[in-house]
Amino acid sequence: MPGQERIRNNYFDGLQVTGRHKAVFFIIMVAYFCEQMDNWNFGFIAPALMQHWGLTMRDIGTVTFWYFTAMTCGGFVGGFISDLIGRRKTFLIAITLFSTASIINGLTDDFHVFVASRALTGFGVFCLMVCSQAYIAEMAPAESRGKWQNLVAGVGFCAVPVIGMLCRAIIPLHEEAWRYIFYLGGMGYIALFIAWKYLDESPRWLVSRGRIKEAEFVMRDLTHLDIDLSEAASKGATKKPPMREVLLGMISQKYIKRTLVILVLVLCTNPATFVVTNWTATLLKAHGFTLEECLMATTLISIGVPLGLFASSAFTDMGGRKIPLVIMLAAMAVLAPIFGNVSSYWTVVGVGALLTAFVMGLGFTIFSYTAESYPTHLRNTATGFHSSIGRLAVAFSQPLIPLVYAAYSFDGVFYIFSALCVVPALVLALWGARTGGKSLEDIA
């Protein structure tokens, strides 16, 4: 601004988050909400498709397999592409993909088209998830990165109980009413329009490409201050890095230790947490609860999804991010066997909601931790890699859950869940780095 003294600052660190800056986080909240409606709706729609299309459990398994496979690809591709063309463009592409694919799911009568468009939904959903996690880390002050990460996710995951209630109200209307739920996925175009108009590119990414003046313009737009980024730019690369460095930088000597720690985190916690989010109703039904009790319990337990994210936003920036992660893993390790051994309906609901809250808080704190662990030029590629490896671990673990249940019963599943929390807690406590509250440039 004319006449205003220039301020030297390391991007947003130490600055107040203005109303315009908060609007950026609000845009991501809206996109998350639409994304999670598309992500969770199939679980509620599947029984209607089995009844009215005559689909079998094997057909539902086919849809789920390709959905998770496409999510894995979306994580890899989205992370890599966003490091090449920018966070904003990748964000817009992802919203377009999952919103369009959801509408196609509602329109089609062909099973193969349905599978393909559902897979495209998964690709877009996880592409946006990976891109936005690093984007939030780059756009938030060091002092409150985890807070904004979890607040944004908390609002977005309010879609889980909302889509559950909408499905319970709409799907029984008539045999084709499930299509309306997929049409609601078109709401993503609202987020697309808002993001197209108001979402700024990450100034860190712009600086990494040598576009310092553009980065300073973004800073001025969001902070209303004239910030000189020349000193911040001197701490990192200011030109397009070689493709090999983007792809292989996370296994270089400098980053291999943190890469291995995060790999242990995602390989253990992703299969464990999906037991809670995907299998609770099925396991409760097998454990002797009626179908109605299982559906109601699952709906009530799902309230723990946004509540866990809102609650964790209050403490996730403490202890260098490492300590909250260890505490949440320890809490889950204790709660899981309790959940596996209680039989009272309301105790199951209460412990299940609390366990779900820790599961969701942990998941998005890991996203923050991963994004903070790498420099700007490979941040999204690394985030996409770790997230996709985690999803692959989920895909391969799914057939094992019925086998574990058959061999060790309901409580056995959750004893294994507990072990999958203890291992990464120990690894993180011994070898994990502290990243929270520090400038991203100082960490890298």
Image (cartoon, grey):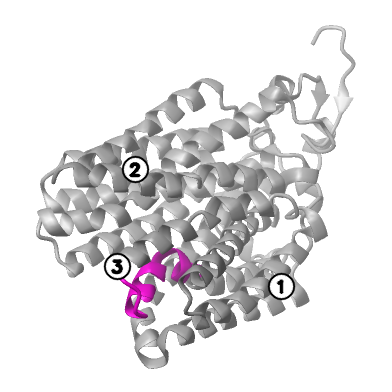
Please indicate whether residue 78 sits to the left or right of residue 118 in the image.
right
Pointer 1 and pointer 2: residues touching (CB < 8 Å)? no
Element at label 1: helix
Report the mark closest to the observer, 3 or 2.
3
Q: Give the Cα distance between marks 3 and 2.
A: 19 Å
- Tell me what residue is drawn at x 68 percent, y 41 percent: 138
- Mark 3 / mark 1, whichever is N-terminal: 3
* Quarter of the image where the C terminus is located: bottom right
Q: Amino acid at mark 3?
A: Leu
Pointer 3 and pointer 1: residues touching (CB < 8 Å)? no
Q: Residue furthest right?
A: 5
Which percent across, then down, holds residue 323? 77, 65
Q: Amino acid at mark 1?
A: Leu
- Mark 3 / mark 2, whichever is N-terminal: 2
Residue under label 2, please give it: 166
Residue under label 1, please give it: 428
Which percent across, then down, holds residue 314? 74, 50
Pick the front one: 336 or 390: 336
Residue under label 3, please give it: 291
Which percent across, then down, holds residue 165? 37, 46
Image vertical order of residue 219 relative to residue 129, above or below: above
